[in-house]
Amino acid sequence: MAKIAVIHTGGKQYKVQEGETLKVEKLEAEIGKKVKLETLLIAEGDNFELGTPSLGAKVEAEVLETAKGKKVTVVKYKNKTRYKKTVGHRQMFTAIKILKIA
């Protein structure tokens, strides 16, 4: 079986495998640099390590890019008062590739 891990970054948790690419909340790291991510769980078959609350930084990833996501449109509207306001927002993200799970 493949080795999997659960990481915690940007207030969210992600289940990852080696070689996987994913988008996470913006990280303060340059493109091409390697970062270590806080690991909550590592599992391989029936064997697993569970942190209480964390195992430390056991997952290594490479930063592929930092960019803005798709636009989210927010509309505020009040009936019968001629009030309508439209606001757009694009959240920053960092694309990372999981290199190694220790």
Image (spheres, rainbow, N blue to C red):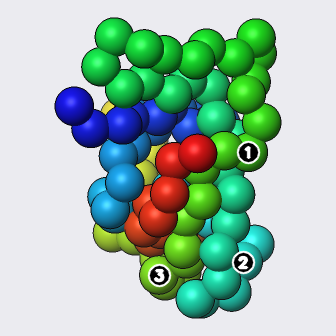
**Distance between the Cα atoms at labels 3 and 1?**
19 Å
> Which residue position is annotated with label 3?
64
Q: Check the image and report above or below for 42 versus 58.
A: above
Q: Position of residue 11 (x, y in %)?
A: 65, 36
> Which residue position is annotated with label 1?
57
Q: Tell me the mark number nearer the camera, choosing from 3 and 1.
A: 1
Residue type (three-letter) at the residue carrying disc 3: Leu
Q: Position of residue 75 (x, y in %)?
A: 38, 51
Q: Check the image and report above or below for 91 versus 51.
A: below
Residue 97 in the figure: left or right of residue 1? right
Residue type (three-letter) at the residue carrying disc 2: Ala
Q: Residues within 10 Å of mark 2 (few under 14, many from 20)?
A: some
**Element type where label 1 sits in the image:** strand
- The residue positioned 37% from the left and 26% from the top of the image is 44
- Between residue 5 and residue 70, name the one nearer to us: 5
**Distance between the Cα atoms at labels 1 and 2?**
16 Å
- Using the rendered view, name the quadrant where residue 62 is placed: bottom right
Q: Residues within 10 Å of mark 3 (few under 14, many from 20)?
A: some
Q: Residues within 10 Å of mark 1 (few under 14, many from 20)?
A: some
- Using the rendered view, name the quadrant where residue 19 is placed: bottom left
| Mark before the other along the chain sequence, 3 or 1 | 1
For the question of whether residue 25 can be seen, the reply is no
